[in-house]
């Protein structure tokens, strides 16, 4: 089952996604995001729609765990 559908427009530097559980489309303007700090959105809790570029919150980076480690 598909949970997320995504679109990356590299020409206009826009990343868009849509949940299969919601009719709303959200997008981020990549040229306006500060990639030097960790940040994320929480889509289920935030009920996001439209341009969410300014809604990223500072968070701790994800800790990846290797299987069998």
Image: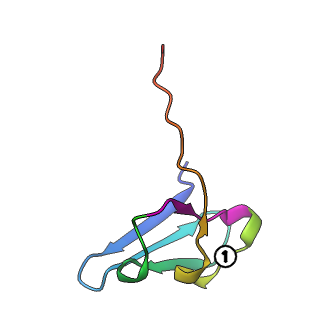
Q: Is residue 38 magenta?
A: yes
| Viewer-side residue, 61 vs 18 | 61
Q: Return the x and y of residue 22 as percentages of the image width and height.
A: 67, 70
Report the number of discs: 1
Q: Return the x and y of residue 9 as percentages of the image width and height.
A: 31, 78
On screen, residue 42 versus residue 14, left or right, reads right
Judged from this view, the residue extending furthest toward the left is 11
Q: Is residue 41 magenta?
A: yes
Residue sitting at 50 percent across and 28 percent down?
65
Judged from this view, the residue extending furthest toward the front is 36
On screen, residue 27 versus residue 32, left or right, reads right
Q: Return the x and y of residue 30 as percentages of the image width and height.
A: 38, 77
Secondary element type, mark 1: loop
Please give the range of residues in magenta. 37-44
Instruction: Provide the residue designation for mark 1.
Output: 48
Residue sitting at 54 percent across and 45 percent down?
62
- Give the answer, above or below, for where 21 lies relative to 61: below
Residue sitting at 55 percent across and 78 percent down?
26
Residue sitting at 61 percent across and 77 percent down?
55
Q: Residues within 10 Å of mark 1 (few under 14, many from 20)?
A: some
- Give the answer, above or below, for where 28 lies relative to 67: below
- Give the answer, above or below, for where 31 lies relative to 22: below
On screen, residue 33 versus residue 55, left or right, reads left
| Viewer-side residue, 47 vs 30 | 30
Q: How is the image coloured?
A: rainbow
Judged from this view, the residue extending furthest toward the top is 68
């Amino acid at each position: 089952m598909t949970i997320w559908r995504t679109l990356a427009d590299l020409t206009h530097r826009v990343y868009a996604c849509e949940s299969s559980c919601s009719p709303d489309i959200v997008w981020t303007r990549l040229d306006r995001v500060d990639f030097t700090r960790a940040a994320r959105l929480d889509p289920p809790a935030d009920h996001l729609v439209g341009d969410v570029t300014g809604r990223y919150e500072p968070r701790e980076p994800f800790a990846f765990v290797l299987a069998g480690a």
